[in-house]
Image (spheres, helix red, strand yellow):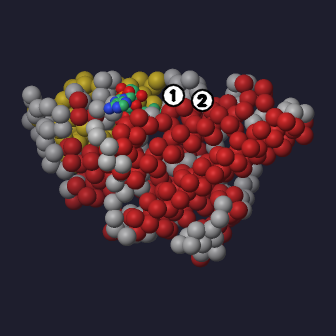
């Protein structure tokens, strides 16, 4: 199926610094018309393969990691260009980005804290998509309270030996490398004595066990480290200062593609509107229910526009060289709740049919439940907003 880019009207009113007639948008649209992206299959393994192949196609055309500095293979694009880039990809219904733990998180953190040797070794593979990455932070008893983590590593000869368990590791089963936050100082507590290591996943000391979710996907995994080996120099930042490296990494979490997750939601909402029209025409929903659904969609559209403004503000701050700070939590909260509500509304748009297993909208409804958990739960975001933006007591 050839997918043609949707009209810019789907995104809503034009924003002054990212106009719809911008030459960057025009050039990218022309390229997308010549290289129409495949639509994502529903099956997870096929979906991942589709995303990876799209990543490679983009990489070969020099269209991955636009925001990376030129010296590391990127184009040094400014945040506004990134904003337009992801909007155009969403309008073209391109597969979702893959390798984001490498591209968005570890890559930029390596640039900030990594040795020249590590940058040279790992950055090209992240960009090309030849090496896949996963994030090994959360543990069974350490999620929101990350500083309580217990996975440990100690030097033996010229290698680190890692023991412990990580969990909720997204796409761990496809990863070649995992960046693992470990306790490297015996007896240390909280954020002291931690080190960020790069651990090869495909080795005897690492077992990856996928976790089945309610959607049927196995999107994340448990990862067990039993005397796993890491070369002594594969440390991001300084030994014992992993918390600093982790904090740098978290700063990137809401940057880059985070600026534009509104675009995918708006495209999904447009599809949802069409599903209502279609269901009404077929008599699958009554005119009254269709009218209710449209009113609900309008309220969601308004919230999407709010998210779009927040994302644009994030890009503007980044363009001015300012940090996002607690505003990132506000954006994250708005996005997570919106993603879930939109998933529910879109599934319900087609009436009772939405309860059928195997449908794309039913799958999305279940899969989006996680949006208010990963990258920080809604409760944690509310705490940050309360304390840092509103100045309320702890
Ligand atoms: C789809 C998905 C993908 C993920 N991918 C990864 C990954 O690739 N790598 C990785 O390391 N992790 C990943 N995670 C883990 C994610 O970071 C954690 O789930 C998240 O940080 C919450 O931690 P937890 O699940 O241990 O819940 P907990 O921290 O135990 O929280 C349980 C509940 O208590 C609430 N709570 C906790 N502390 C407070 C507080 N101080 N105030 C108020 N309420 C509080 C929470 O909001 C939540 O409702 C992923 C999670 C999901 C759902």
Q: Where is residue 206 in the image (x, y as percent from the top left)?
A: 31, 28
As rendered, which of 19 and 307 lies closer to the eye? 307
As rendered, which of 341 and 178 lies closer to the eye? 341
Say which quarter of the image contains residue 50: top right
Image quadrant holding the C terminus, namely: top left
Q: Which residue is drawn at 41% across and 35% down?
A: 379
Residue 360 visible in the snapshot: no
Q: Which residue is drawn at 44% across and 37% down?
A: 378
Provide the secondary structure element on which disc 1 rests: loop
Query: Which of the numbered marks, if any, corresponds to residue 366?
Result: 2
Q: Distance between the residues labelled 1 and 2?
A: 13 Å
Task: Specify whether 28 is left or right of 202.
Answer: right
Q: Position of residue 305 (x, y in %)?
A: 60, 55
Task: Specify whether 134 is left or right of 189.
Answer: right
Query: Which of the numbered marks, if any, corresponds to residue 218?
Result: 1
Q: Nearer the viewer, mark 1 or mark 2?
A: 2
Task: Specify whether 185 is left or right of 52.
Answer: left
Provide the secondary structure element on which disc 2 rests: helix
Q: Residue at x 40, y 47 (%)?
A: 329
Indicate if the residue with disc 2 has its beta carbon within 8 Å of ligand 1. Answer: no
Position of 212 relative to 179 (above/below) = above
Q: Which residue is drawn at 15% across and 48% down?
A: 238
């Amino acid at each position: 199926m050839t997918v043609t880019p949707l009209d810019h009207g789907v995104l809503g009113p034009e924003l002054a610094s990212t106009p719809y007639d911008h030459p960057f948008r025009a050039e990218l649209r022309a390229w997308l018309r010549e290289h129409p992206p495949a639509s994502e299959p529903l099956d997870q393994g096929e979906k991942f393969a589709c995303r990876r192949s799209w990543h490679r196609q983009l990489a070969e055309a020099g269209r991955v990691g636009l925001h990376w500095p030129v010296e590391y293979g990127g184009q040094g694009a400014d945040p506004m260009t990134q904003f337009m880039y992801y909007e155009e990809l969403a309008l073209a219904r391109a597969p979702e980005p893959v390798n984001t733990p490498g591209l968005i998180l570890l890559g930029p953190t390596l640039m900030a804290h990594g040795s020249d040797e590590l940058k040279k070794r790992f950055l090209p593979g992240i960009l090309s998509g030849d090496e896949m990455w996963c994030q090994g932070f959360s543990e069974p008893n350490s999620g929101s309270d990350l500083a309580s983590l217990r996975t440990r590593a100690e030097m033996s000869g010229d290698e680190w030996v890692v023991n412990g368990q990580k969990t909720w590791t997204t796409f761990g089963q496809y990863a070649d490398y995992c960046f693992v936050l470990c306790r490297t100082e015996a007896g240390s507590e909280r954020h002291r004595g931690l080190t960020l290591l790069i651990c090869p996943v495909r080795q005897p000391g690492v077992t990856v066990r996928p976790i089945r979710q309610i959607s049927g996907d196995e999107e994340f995994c448990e990862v067990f480290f039993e005397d796993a080996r890491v070369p002594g120099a594969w440390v991001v930042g300084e030994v014992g200062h992993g918390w600093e490296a982790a904090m740098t990494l978290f700063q990137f979490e809401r940057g880059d593609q985070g600026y534009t997750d509104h675009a995918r939601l708006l495209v999904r909402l447009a599809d949802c509107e069409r599903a209502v029209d279609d269901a009404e025409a077929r008599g699958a929903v009554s005119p009254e229910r269709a009218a209710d659904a449209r009113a609900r969609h309008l309220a969601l559209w308004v919230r999407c526009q709010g998210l779009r403004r927040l994302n644009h503000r994030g890009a503007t701050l980044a363009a001015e060289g300012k940090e996002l700070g607690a505003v990132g939590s506000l954006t994250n909260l708005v996005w997570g709740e919106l993603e879930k509500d939109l998933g529910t509304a879109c599934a319900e748009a087609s009436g009772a049919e939405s309860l059928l297993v195997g449908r794309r909208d039913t799958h999305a409804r279940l899969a989006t439940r996680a949006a208010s958990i990963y990258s920080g739960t809604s409760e944690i975001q509310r705490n940050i907003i309360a304390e840092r933006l509103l100045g309320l007591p702890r």
